[in-house]
Amino acid sequence: MKKNKPKSNNGWKHDFAINKSLYLLTVPIVVYFIIFCYVPMFGVVMAFQDYKPARGILGSRFVGFKNFATFFGGPNFFTLLRNTFVINALGLFVGFPLTIIFALLLNEIRLKWFKKSVQTISYMPYFVSMVVIAGLIIEFCSTNGVVTNLAVKLLGIQRENLLQNPKYFWTINLLSDIWQGLGYGSIFFISAITAVPTEQYEAAAIDGAGRWKRCLHVTLPGIMPAIVTMLILRCGTMMSVGGDKILLLYNSSIYETADVISTNVQRMGIENMQYGYATAVGLFNSVVGTTLLVISNTLSKKATDIGIV
Amino acid sequence: MVEKLKPSRVVFNILNYSFMIVFAFLCIIPIWHVTMASLSNPRLLMSASGIIWKPLGEVTFDGYKLVLQTASVLKGYGNTIIYVVWNAVVGTLITVIAGYLVSRKSFKLKNPLMIFILFTMMFSGGLIPSYQVNRALGLINSRWALMIPGIINAFYITMMKSGFEQLPDSYEESAKLDGAGPMTIMFKILAPLVKANIAVIAMFTVVMHWNSWYPASIYLPAARDAWPLQLIMRELLIKNDTATVLIATGDASGVVNYTANLVKYCVVIVGTLPVLMAYPFAQKYFVTGVTLGGVKG
C-alpha cells in the first residue's frame, strides 16, 4: 500500500501558525534560561583566564590551566578535598541509614495518633531556617552552652567553645544535620513502606515470620528501589551539599576541618575577588560531582537494575 | 486480629516508643528554649545557662515591644514578605505556563524545550559565573537580584509537566471545539485540575524563600535596606552584631546591652513562628511534594 506523503504544511511553519500563542509564551522562558543558566555555563571559560571584571570574558587574558595548577598545588588542596569528602561521607554513611532506620521504626508503631504526632514533630526542624539553626548551634556550643555542659559532664572533655576547636566540627555538623533532617528525610521511605503490598506481609506471617523477619525480608526489599534512588542522588550531590550551613558556622580557627570546596569558592570568589581561581575550583567540584553521579548510577544499574539517568 | 506479644516484642516496643518520645522531645527543646527565653527578664537571662524551661522572672513582652520598634527588623520582615509573595506568585505562574508548554502534545517545540530545560538541571556554570552575569545585569545590591534569578526552577517545571500529562486529552479537545484559546484552556480549564501540584510548588517556594539567606548575602552585600529578615537575623545571631541592628531604636546604650540579648530570641520567634504555625497544616503538600518528585533529595 502506498503511504501518504506527509503534507508539507506539517512543518514548523504550520505548527507556528496554529500554536502562535504557545510560541509567544515560550520566548520569555527560553530567554530566562539562556541568561541565567546557559550564559553562566559558558562563563566557566573564566576558569582558564586571569579574569578581570573590567575587561570581561572576551577581553581577559587566557592563562591555560594556571588556576587549576594554583589550586592543585596550593597548601589547602588536600585539606579541602578531605573535608568535603569526610563531611559528606559521614552524612552518607551515618545520616542516610538513620533516616531509613527511623522510617522502619516508625512503621512499627501501631498507635496511629502517636505515630502521626511524632512524624509531624520530627519534620519541624526542617522548617526552621539555617540561620536560626546555626545561631542555636553557636549558642549551645559556646563555653557555657548546653551541649558543652553535657559533653563536659558525660565525655569528660575540656570546657571550651566547641566551635573554636577543629577536633569537634565534624561531629557537631553531623549531629545537627541528623537533628534537622532525620524526620524530613524519612518521608520518602515512609511512603515507600506504605506502598509495600499487605499480602506479602500476610504471606510471610503465615510462613511463621515474626515482625523482625518480616521487616528484614519484606519491608527492606520492598523499599530497596527507593533506597537506591536516594543513594544515587546523594552521591551526585556529594560535592555540593552543606556549604551554606558551614558558612554560617565556621570561623578561621577551624578552617582546618570546616573549610570545604564550596565555602572556599565563596570566600575566594566573592570576598577576595579571585574570580578565575574560584571558577576553576567550582568547575573541578562540579566535574567530580557529575562523575560520582554517573559512576554510582552505572554501578547501581549493574547491581540492581535501578537507575535514575 | 491481635497478635500474641512475645516478651522480646514487648521490650522492643518499650524501647521504640521511648526512643520516639526522646527524639520528639529533642526536636522541640531548642524552639521551646528560645520561646521561653524571649519571655524572660533580660537581666536574669544574661546570667542564665542551660536550657530555659520556663520564663526567668516575670513574663515580659518587652523584647517583642522592642522588636516592633526596631526599624531594621521591621524592614527585613517587609522585604522577606515582598520576596516570598513575588516568588510564590510570579514564579509559580511562570512554572505553570512552562509546564503547560512542555506537556502540549500538538506543540512541536515541546520536546526540544523540555531538553533545553532539563539540561540546566544537570549542568550549571557555578557560583562565580552566575555572579558575574548578575553583576553585568546591574543586579548587585538591587532587590531584583532576589526576584529575577532563581524565579523558575527546572525541577518544578517537570513536576507541573507530569501533572498536566495525567489529565485526559479530552478536556483540551472539547474546550478547543468550543473555541477556547490556549490561555483560557490553561488557566480556566486545566490549571484548576492540577491544583494540588500548584499548591505543592507554591508551598515549597514560600518556605524556601522565607528561610533563604545565601543569595541575599552574595547579591545584596551593601543594600541593608533590601535585606530579608534572615540576613538581619544572621547579623544578630551569627555575627553577634546587635549594635548595628538595634541602633535605630535610640535607646540608651546600657539598656540596649541588656535587652539586645532578649531581642535576639524575640526576633528568632517572630521570624520562625509563621512557618512553624503553618507547616502542620500544609504538611500533606510537603509529603506529596517529596514523593512526587521523589527525586529531588
Image (cartoon, rainbow, N blue to C red):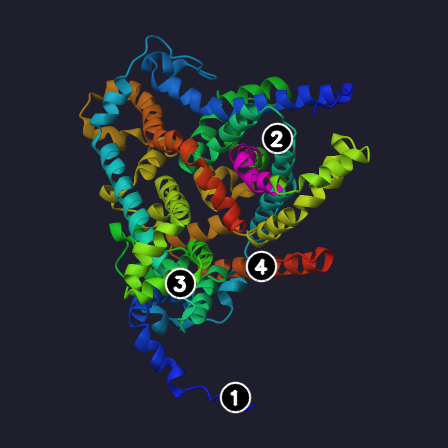
Q: Is residue A78 magenta?
A: no
Q: Nearer the viewer, mark 3 or mark 1?
A: 1
Residue pointed to by mark 2? A106
Q: Residue A305 has which mark?
A: none
Residue pointed to by mark 4? A288
Sequence-first disc among 1 and 2: 1
Residue A135, quarter of picture: top left
At 32% from the left and 24% from the top, the residue drawn is B266
Task: Please state if B283 lies on the left or on the right of A78 as rendered.
Answer: left
Question: Residue lying furthest top in this view?
Answer: B57
Sequence-first disc among 3 and 4: 3
Sequence-first disc among 3 and 2: 3
Q: How many callouts does the rendering have?
A: 4
Highlighted magenta segment, given as a residue range: A175-192
**Whole-percent x and y of residue A26?**
33, 67
Question: Residue lying furthest left in this view?
Answer: B250
Q: Nearer the viewer, mark 3 or mark 2?
A: 2
Q: Residue A37 has which mark?
A: 3
As shown in the figure, which amino acid type bears the numbered disc 4?
Answer: Val
Q: Secondary structure at mark 3?
A: helix
Sequence-first disc among 4 and 1: 1
Q: Secondary structure at mark 4?
A: helix
Residue B135, quarter of picture: bottom left
